[in-house]
Image: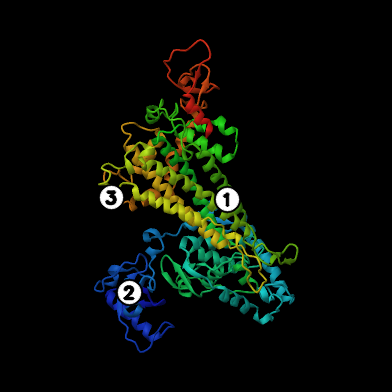
């Protein structure tokens, strides 16, 4: 039996025979080897004492008196903290030597997948990339992509053999593009490029984001226009499949000659330098993490360093996550808006299909169609809607009535951005680009990040509006002047504060988003001594777009909580069947508020439902059923409309297939002989037309 032990970032393999010795002995033996071998982290003339011993997987503290065989498996991994590692090894989180798996992977557990996704550089979608980031698939290259990569590499080798002067292959970089490099120094040139450009700062990308970054770079290299060798590319694939992930700080790119700093950190780890993480080892020196997984560091050849770092993959990978999450929350924002409109006793007449055909924006029509399928209809009647059928309310507030118009452009924005990000994900973004079939290397500008930068700035603006609308609807829910419900949706107001401060939370997030929506891509600073005189600032555009989406998710979660709480005051009346299913799902994780309690866990629980798309999934089939079973649109009676003609009867099940539309009115009303105008008082009608 043997155990790999980490002391201050260095790994030591300790033979344990049959494991009958104690955990204390194992820690002291690892420390003895550390002091004997004196690695770079060794500090002379200092007494070292073991502070604690933990499993790297999960971070569980091991009892020193337990036997090794009772706690660890053969080839297991532990981390040893010394008394001198920090002022308080338990609390000094910023400088703590040991970063445990639990702080990197939700739940502290990650299992390598069995299924593979084939990459060819041409067909990766944003959802595919998210699934790769979540560790749902391993990667393999298609045969066609391998052949293109080998042809491209053969052309680079020919350039080197013939001593031709080609940028990035036999010359320096950026301002040093005119400096020709000796043939004997070409490999060192590529290594120096990675080391010098690994100059990022800030917190590290999560394993999920780093997997996305690595997968996307592999996809771009698989196109066969980069000049990388098939050997090096397959080493990248092997590292991905073992989830050996370099330490990549999120700040440092200006998004012009590619995301040079973050991609250099990615490449540095694959070279066996810097820090690296894997589920089984936690953080450690890259060479040891690779070695633990029987992987060898990449040895760069001519052009390969440049091939590893020229591209917009940081912008695009983060942007892909922001785009996918924006689409998920936008769909569910429509559902939550329907729930709020229902409990605020609004009308669905504003969603009449004929209204939206007169302004035929795709997203607007889509949202109106969804709302019609969720609200009161012949297919899904609502007792709440029936209860206020003849109220004197003329029209609803804009955040209810204009939901299709505002949510609609958010949906259209997300789709527009998805198309740009998908194109970028499957684009060759190197410089120079290697055209093996033409026998030509062209220095151009595909590395410039303006496309994804502009798109992601637009995404932030578009998706923010969902939260802006939602926060105003939350205000209407908690304000008794608007809702006619108890103030802040709680009984015994004053003694209980209810949803008072959670509305403040929503307001703060919306305000924060207003600042984050300022476009990063309108800025540019000249870099590389004027050679790169216009840059995209796409890295920040991507990071803040993702933060805007995160904030929107939280605001929508708060609205959903408030809407479900509002229903409690309308019972025993029931809403439509799909919205009742939403209510049941929320109540499966959050109980009603009968008095004040700790609210943050409720927001987190409902936010999780939204991020996992469970709200959408619970209503999706109901919406499809509505559209398949009811092709006559239910048009409810509303004071916000008037109709010339006879009273129109309630639509019966037998009449649903007729190509006509009806107003839900008083079926028993006596019909007049001539035309009859169903109207509202004149003053209300004037008000209706005014706005």
Distance CA(mark 3)–CA(mark 1): 40 Å
Instruction: Residue under label 3, please give it.
Output: 597
Query: In the rendered structure, are the residues bearing label 3 and label 1 in contact, judged by CB atoms less than 8 Å apart?
Result: no
Residue depicted at 57% across the width and 73% down the height: 197
Q: Residue 432: name its quadrant.
A: bottom right
* Outermost residue toward the front in this view: 683
Q: Which sits earlier in the primary sequence, circle 2 or circle 3?
A: 2
Would residue 454 be seen by someone viewing this image from the given angle?
Answer: yes
* Outermost residue toward the bottom in this view: 45
Instruction: Residue under label 2, please give it.
Output: 89
SS state under label 1: helix
Looking at the image, is mark 2 or mark 3 nearer the viewer? Answer: 3
Instruction: Residue under label 1, please give it.
Output: 418
SS state under label 2: loop
Looking at the image, is mark 3 or mark 1 nearer the viewer? Answer: 3
Query: For this rendering, which residue is in front, 498 or 411?
Result: 498
């Amino acid at each position: 039996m043997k155990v790999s032990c980490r002391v201050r970032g260095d790994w030591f393999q300790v033979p344990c025979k049959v494991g009958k010795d104690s955990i204390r002995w194992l820690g002291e033996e690892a420390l003895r080897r550390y002091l004997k071998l004196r690695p770079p982290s060794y500090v002379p003339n200092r007494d070292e004492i073991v502070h604690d011993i933990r499993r790297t997987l999960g971070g569980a503290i091991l009892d020193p008196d337990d036997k090794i065989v009772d706690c660890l498996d053969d080839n297991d991994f532990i981390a040893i903290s010394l008394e001198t590692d920090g002022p308080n090894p338990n609390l000094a989180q910023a400088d703590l030597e040991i970063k445990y798996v639990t702080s990197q992977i939700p739940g502290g557990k990650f299992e390598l997948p069995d299924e593979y996704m084939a990459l060819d550089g041409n067909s990766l979608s944003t959802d595919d990339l998210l699934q790769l980031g979540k560790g749902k698939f391993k990667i393999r290259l298609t045969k066609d992509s391998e052949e293109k990569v080998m042809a491209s590499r053969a052309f680079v080798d020919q350039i080197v053999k013939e001593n031709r002067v080609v940028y990035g292959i036999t010359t320096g970089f950026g301002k040093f593009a005119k400096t020709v490099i000796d043939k004997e120094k070409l490999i060192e040139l590529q290594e120096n490029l990675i080391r010098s450009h690994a100059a990022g700062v800030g917190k590290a990308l999560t394993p999920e984001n780093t997997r996305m970054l690595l997968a996307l770079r592999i996809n771009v290299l698989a196109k066969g226009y980069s000049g990388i060798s098939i050997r090096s590319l397959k080493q990248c694939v092997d590292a991905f499949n073992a989830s050996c992930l370099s330490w990549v700080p999120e700040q440092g790119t200006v998004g012009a000659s590619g995301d040079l700093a973050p991609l250099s950190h990615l490449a540095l780890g694959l070279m066996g330098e810097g820090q690296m993480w894997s589920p089984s080892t936690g953080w450690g020196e890259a060479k040891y993490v690779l070695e633990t997984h029987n992987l060898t560091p990449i040895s760069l050849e001519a052009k390969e360093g440049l091939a590893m770092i020229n591209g917009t993959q940081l912008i695009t990978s983060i942007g892909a996550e922001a785009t996918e999450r924006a689409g998920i929350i936008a769909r569910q924002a429509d559902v939550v808006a329907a729930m709020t409109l229902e409990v605020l006793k609004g009308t669905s007449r504003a969603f009449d299909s004929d209204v939206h055909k007169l302004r035929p924006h795709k997203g607007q029509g889509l949202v109106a169609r969804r709302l019609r399928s969720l609200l009161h209809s012949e297919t899904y009647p609502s007792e709440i809607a029936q209860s206020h059928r003849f109220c004197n309310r003329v029209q609803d507030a804009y955040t209810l009535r204009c939901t299709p118009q505002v949510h609609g452009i958010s949906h259209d924005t997300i789709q527009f951005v998805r198309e740009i990000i998908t194109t970028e994900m499957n684009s060759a973004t190197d410089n120079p680009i290697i055209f093996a079939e033409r026998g030509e290397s062209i220095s151009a500008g595909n590395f410039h990040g303006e496309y994804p930068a502009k798109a992601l700035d637009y995404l932030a603006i578009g998706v923010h509006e969902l939260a802006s609308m939602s926060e105003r609807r939350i205000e209407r829910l908690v304000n008794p002047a608007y809702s006619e419900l108890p103030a802040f949706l709680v009984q015994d107001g004053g003694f209980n504060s209810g949803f008072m401060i959670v509305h403040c939370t929503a307001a703060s997030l919306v305000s924060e988003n207003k600042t984050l929506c300022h476009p990063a891509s309108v800025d540019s600073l000249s870099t590389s001594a004027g050679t790169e005189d216009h840059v995209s600032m796409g890295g920040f555009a991507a990071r803040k777009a993702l933060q805007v989406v995160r904030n929107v998710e939280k605001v929508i979660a708060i609205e959903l909580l408030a809407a479900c709480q509002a229903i409690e005051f309308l019972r025993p009346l029931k809403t439509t069947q799909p919205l009742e299913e939403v209510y049941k799902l929320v109540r499966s994780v959050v109980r009603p508020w009968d008095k004040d309690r700790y609210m943050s866990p409720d927001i987190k629980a409902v936010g999780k439902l939204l991020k996992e798309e469970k709200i959408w999934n619970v209503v999706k089939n109901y919406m499809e059923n509505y559209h398949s079973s009811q092709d006559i649109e239910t048009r409810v009676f509303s004071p916000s409309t008037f109709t010339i003609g006879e009273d129109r009867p309630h639509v019966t099940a037998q009449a649903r297939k007729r190509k006509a539309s009806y107003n839900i009115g008083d079926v028993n009303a006596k019909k007049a002989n001539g035309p009859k105008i169903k109207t509202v008082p004149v003053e209300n009608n004037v008000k209706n037309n005014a706005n």
